[in-house]
Amino acid sequence: MFAPPAFADDPADPAVAAALARINDGTYTQADIDLIKTDPVLADEVPDPSTNLAAMDVSGGDASPVYTIDATSCWHVTVTVRRRSLLGSTLYKWHHYVEWCGTSSGKKVTKWRQRYDYVTNASSVVYVRELNAESHSSTPVYNVATSFRQRHIEYCVVKYGCYTSHYPHSKIWVYWWGGYAYTASNA
């Protein structure tokens, strides 16, 4: 990787590069974390490996009504997964958004209106890559339908290159009456 002139005389520290590799593969020690934290700029760009499944960093919004016509109503919800740095800053927020319609006659999810994902609050080291997985229930379907999405997020730091990836994902169950449930992770 080409280093800009500002970094030409500041080569990558092999000990830091090794610590980043161990954080990436899950074999890190507290000494690796402490070493990265000696450089506050870098520490604020490195994902905290201890927060992979932190419940406080996964949230669902209120299932808000979009519209109702006759016996058919439509709703939308967003499930959000946040990734934090070693210093607690937000590295990104990944969102899985769905809109669906349902009817009380037959208790069916009648259709998907929209389903997509997007990233907000992305740090300069975060690169949003390809959609890795996507699936959804066919509609109409009795009672409940599901939507699943998984996105590839890569981290690249000038002196150390692209050194790790995460794959935020969620599965949302939507019900004919507007309710929903979800599972999600930022691992």
Image (cartoon, rainbow, N blue to C red):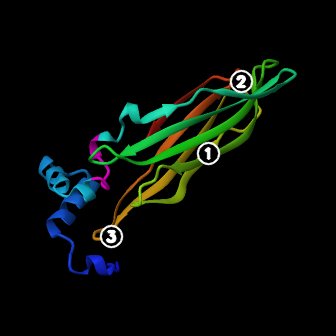
Q: Is 176 in front, or is 56?
A: 56
Residue visible at 44% across and 35% down?
58
| Residue labelled with disc 2 | 176
**How far from the left and from the top, in percent, is residue 34?**
14, 51
Marking on residue 4: none
Q: Quadrant of residue 106?
A: top right
Whole-number angstrom distance, CA of label 2 to CA of label 1? 19 Å
- Residue 139's place in the image compared with 20, above or below, is above
Specify the amino acid type for callout 1. Ser
Q: Amino acid at mark 2?
A: Trp
Residues packed near mark 2 inside 10 Å, few (<14), some (14 to 19) or many (20 plus): many
Tell which tag, 3 or 2, sits nearer the viewer. 3
Q: Nearer the viewer, mark 1 or mark 3?
A: 3
In-image side of 117 versus 186 (left or right): right
Q: Callout 1: few (<14), some (14-19), or many (20+) C-alpha neighbours within 10 Å?
A: few
**Residue beneath the point at 68% across and 23% down:** 178
> Label 1, label 3: how many angstroms apart (C-alpha)?
35 Å
Circle 3: element type: loop
Mark 3 and mark 1 in contact (Cβ < 8 Å)?
Answer: no
Prevailing secondary structure class for the magenta stretch in the rendered image? loop
Residues drawn in magenta: 44-50
Whole-percent x, y for residue 103 in the image = 79, 23
Of the two numbered discs 2 and 1 in the rendering, the one whose residue sits closer to the viewer:
2
Q: Which residue is mark 1?
A: 135
Direction left: furthest residue: 31
Residue where numbered disc 3 is placed: 158
Q: Amino acid at mark 3?
A: Val
Disc 2 secondary structure class: loop
